[in-house]
Amino acid sequence: MRNCLLLLFAWFALAVQASPVSDMLERIDRELARMAAERIREASEQERQRQEGIRQQQETQRVDAEVSRASEFAELKQLKELLDAGIITEEEFSIKKRQVLHI
């Protein structure tokens, strides 16, 4: 009985391999592989765009920080000139300096 079942299974396997069902299964496999590859490419592109967005945001923050420091320096320089000209007192200069430096 067991040998008979094995022969029947082998015959069925050969019949499926040589039939349009086998061709259809191969086409389905190829289509599934194509779809998976496309999804991987899309996910990869989305990740690349996300990383680029992060890099751009970091660059913007870096530039903003540099501009802020330059602005603080310019304001301190102007305050020092006012102090040297006797327009403001040392106490006023110290207060403004702490405000500019956020200390």
Image (cartoon, rainbow, N blue to C red):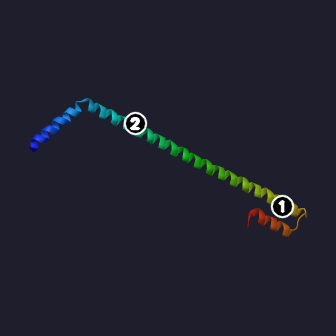
* Left or right relative to 23: residue 82: right
Outermost residue to the bottom: 91
Relative height, residue 45 to residue 75 (above, below): above
| Disc nearer the start of the sequence (2/1) | 2
| Res. 29 image quadrant | top left
**10 Å crowding of disc 2: few (<14), some (14-19), many (20+):** few
Q: Which mark is residue 34?
A: 2
Expressed as whole percent of the image width and height from the top left, the position of residue 81 reads 86, 60
| Res. 90 image quadrant | bottom right
Label 1 secondary element:
helix
Q: Nearer the viewer, mark 2 or mark 1?
A: 2
- What residue do we see at 12% from left, 38% from top? 7
Which of the pair 66/85 is nearer the observer? 66
Screen quadrant of the C terminus: bottom right
Screen quadrant of the N terminus: top left
Q: Which mark is residue 79?
A: 1
The amino acid at mark 2 is Arg
Q: Are marks 2 and 1 in contact (CB under 8 Å)?
A: no
- What residue do we see at 48% from left, 44% from top? 43
Expressed as whole percent of the image width and height from the top left, the position of residue 12 reads 18, 36
* Left or right relative to 75: residue 37: left
Label 2 secondary element:
helix
The amino acid at mark 1 is Leu
- What residue do we see at 84% from left, 62% from top? 80
Expressed as whole percent of the image width and height from the top left, the position of residue 67 reads 72, 52
